Amino acid sequence: MNRTTVLAFALVLAACGGPSGSGSTQQQTSAEAVGSGSADFAGLQKCPESGTWDHYLTAEQAKNPSQYTTDKSDLDSLKAAGANDTYVAVYSDATSGCGNFGSDTPTGKVADVYAIRFKDSSSAAANYKTNLKDFHLSDTDLSNLKSAGGSVAQGSATGLGDNSVMVSISIAGSSLYAAFWQKNQFEVALLTFNVSETDSKSATTKINDRMK
């Protein structure tokens, strides 16, 4: 799956991803319909790299070839696990916040949404724990996050179902929020930097409501 900077606070730089779709079946909700909503992040603009995962990877390859290689491999693995459509939406409050591709930690407000649709809900559920590791949200990562003063909710505590995790942390004036969950045939990762937790959770709810 594709990757970007994630738990840079207290953990290391993290990575995120999702596969690019190669077709969908009848009347299925698309990854774009789930991952992109005009009202998700008020005051933020959508970055040019937003789009299909292939589109995102093409932009990444030009700016960060080594990261591209890792992300392309993750994409191929997700396709092998049954993913058949993806969409990435990148938002920023400034043009300079676009096109970073994991090269640095954002200083302004940035939000990344990764929507992955699998061929069925069983495939999505089976892949959930694997993706936790790929998003640097494994049990070890979560333990480290707690030790650094972050908050962690899992399962029913998130309000997003059994296969879900939600974390937040603030360090030295910067904040990170991340939610990763599986619902029906979808997996979604939402990462925000320096966006209020209230607004981040509101966007999470909107996206979750579209996972049909």
Image (cartoon, grey):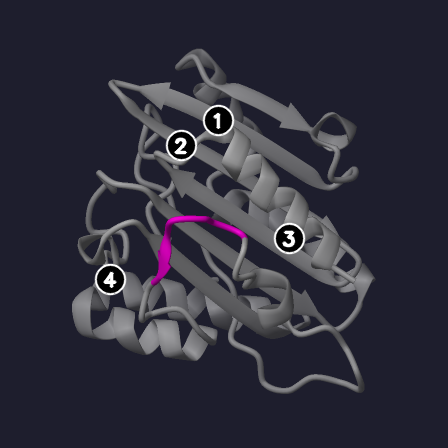
Q: Earlier in the sequence, mark 2 or mark 4?
A: 4
Tag 4: amino acid: Gly
Q: Which residue is mark 3?
A: 207
Mark 1–mark 2 contact, CB under 8 Å? yes
Quadrant including the C terminus: bottom right
Residue 132 visible in the shown view = yes
From the viewer's perspective, tell me whether residue 107 is left or right of residue 23: left
The secondary element bearing badge 4 is classed as: loop
- Inspect the magenta stretch and tell me whether residue 157 lies in it: no
Q: Earlier in the sequence, mark 1 or mark 2?
A: 1
Highlighted magenta segment, given as a residue range: 40-46
Q: Which residue is mark 4?
A: 99
Q: Earlier in the sequence, mark 4 or mark 3?
A: 4
The secondary element bearing badge 1 is classed as: strand
Q: Which residue is mark 1?
A: 168
Q: Which x, y percent locates residue 39?
A: 54, 55
Q: Earlier in the sequence, mark 1 or mark 4?
A: 4
Tag 3: amino acid: Ile
Residues under labels 4 and 3: Cα distance?
A: 23 Å
Residue at image position (66%, 74%) is 30
Camera-side mark, 4 or 3:
3
Residue 2 visible in the shown view = no
Q: Residues within 10 Å of mark 3 (few under 14, many from 20)?
A: many
In this rendering, is residue 30 above or below 143? below
The secondary element bearing badge 3 is classed as: helix
Q: Which x, y percent locates residue 166?
A: 59, 32
Q: Which x, y percent locates residue 167?
A: 53, 29
Camera-side mark, 1 or 3:
3
